[in-house]
Image (cartoon, rainbow, N blue to C red):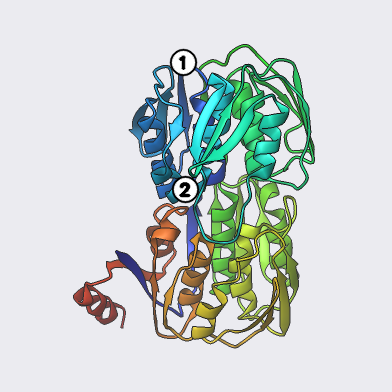
Amino acid sequence: MEQYIIKGGKPLHGEVTIGGAKNAALGILSAAIMTDETVTIENLPNVRDINVLLQAMEGIGAKIERVNEHVVKINGSNISRINIDYEFIRKIRASYYLLGALLGKYSQAQVALPGGCNIGSRPIDQHIKGFEALGASVKIEYGMIHARAEKLVGSHIYLDMVSVGATINIMLAACMAEGQTTIENAAKEPHIVDVANFLNSMGANIKGAGTDIIRIKGVEKLHGTEYSIIPDQIEAGTFMVAAAATKGEVLIKNVIPKHLEAITAKLVEIGATVEEFDDAVLVKSNSRLGNTHVKTLPYPGFPTDMQPQIATLLALSNGTSIVTESIFENRLKYVDELARMGATVKVEGNSAIITGVEGFTGAIVSAPDLRAGAALVTAGLVADGFTIVDQIEYIERGYENFEQKMQSLGAKMEKVDVEDDKAIQKFKLKVG
């Protein structure tokens, strides 16, 4: 087990390059097995979730060739199993995209009920509704979802709630179904568009991705392709907030500024400076920022995956802010950890009422999930003294080379073994 040790108080300065979008990559990798030809995927983030999904795909017979840490070749012609074990789903919820991919290609699939970050219930009823509308029979037995169809036939599907996972899974299942499928009230996130673009590059016929109505004309088969994944908006947003929190100046490269508009708007509103370029944003701040209200919403609203990071920044800002979480009910568990560092936050229902403080002090804290873990690292970068962040395996699920990227911006931060007291003492002596 490893942990981060951080000496706070140093503004972040410099440039950082953002990797491929984890959430897009999970859908795209799953889709890659839907052809018998070889698919090459570039700009792949080298993070734990991706590596676990590749293992799961290998486990059912897909041929995986890692060209380098950011490029993979996948061939799904020899898939011999249509069931995904709980061992993989337990580690990474998005393994369930293999359900739509396998059902779409082989008309049957068997996948364990999902796990992942404990940030609240994420029911799969909309996925099941979509599969059944396409003609599949779906049942849950012994902790497994079994989906089977004589043949899949296009249908009109209205999602009762906006769901990224259901939108992607239904797209996967429908792209080789007979006839036309319409998904209404579809999710509009950038990674939905990226998965659709990838499928289209394989020969699918998908229109409307990025709007709330997606139309899919089924094709007989898909073919090989080469594709590069979009940049990760949440990794970019995390560095944007860290730059503002530490009163630094950071150029964040390899981004699509339009995908960051909700984050940019809130940073500008509270007094940070954000400059947009073609494929980069510059974030700077040299004073204490102001207060605002934030409510998480489906894209293009403020992303739930940025909620802990913005709350951490607002906990250091002037005045009182309210952050309301409307997507997941368990996403405020990190508040107790922030309080250990001096934050003043009161949780009422799904809202955090935040009274800004002048600064944080270092403490030993634990990452309760992926994004909250990144937020606690940001808090440690600001705090007076030393902060230790435990359970960083959550953070490594979605951030590649996180400590190295922070170090390149001047952060005094290292990854050390939990039981290596000498390493901790050595770090403390080195940074003073």
The residue identified by callout 2 is 92
The residue identified by callout 1 is 37
User: From the viewer's perspective, is 44 left or right of 2?
Assistant: right
Q: Which class describes the residues within 10 Å of circle 1: few (<14), some (14-19), or many (20+)? A: some
Q: Residue at x 36, y 32 (%)?
A: 59
Q: Earlier in the sequence, mark 1 or mark 2?
A: 1
- Amino acid type shown at disc 1: Glu
User: Which residue is situated farthest in the front direction here?
Assistant: 141
Quarter holding residue 308:
bottom right
Q: Which class describes the residues within 10 Å of circle 2: few (<14), some (14-19), or many (20+)? A: many
Kindly tell me whether residue 360 is visible in this rendering.
no
Q: Position of residue 287 (x, y in %)?
A: 63, 80
Q: Is residue 347 above or below residue 2?
A: below
Q: Position of residue 233 (x, y in %)?
A: 60, 51
Q: Secondary structure at mark 2?
A: loop
Q: Looking at the image, is mark 1 or mark 2 nearer the viewer?
A: 2
Q: Residue at x 35, y 35 (%)?
A: 68
Q: Nearer the viewer, residue 391 or 131?
A: 131
User: From the viewer's perspective, is 187 left or right of 365?
Assistant: right
User: What label sits on residue 55 in the rendered view?
Assistant: none
- State the CA–CA distance, disc 1 to disc 2: 26 Å
- Amino acid type shown at disc 2: Ile
Q: Position of residue 352 (x, y in %)?
A: 68, 76
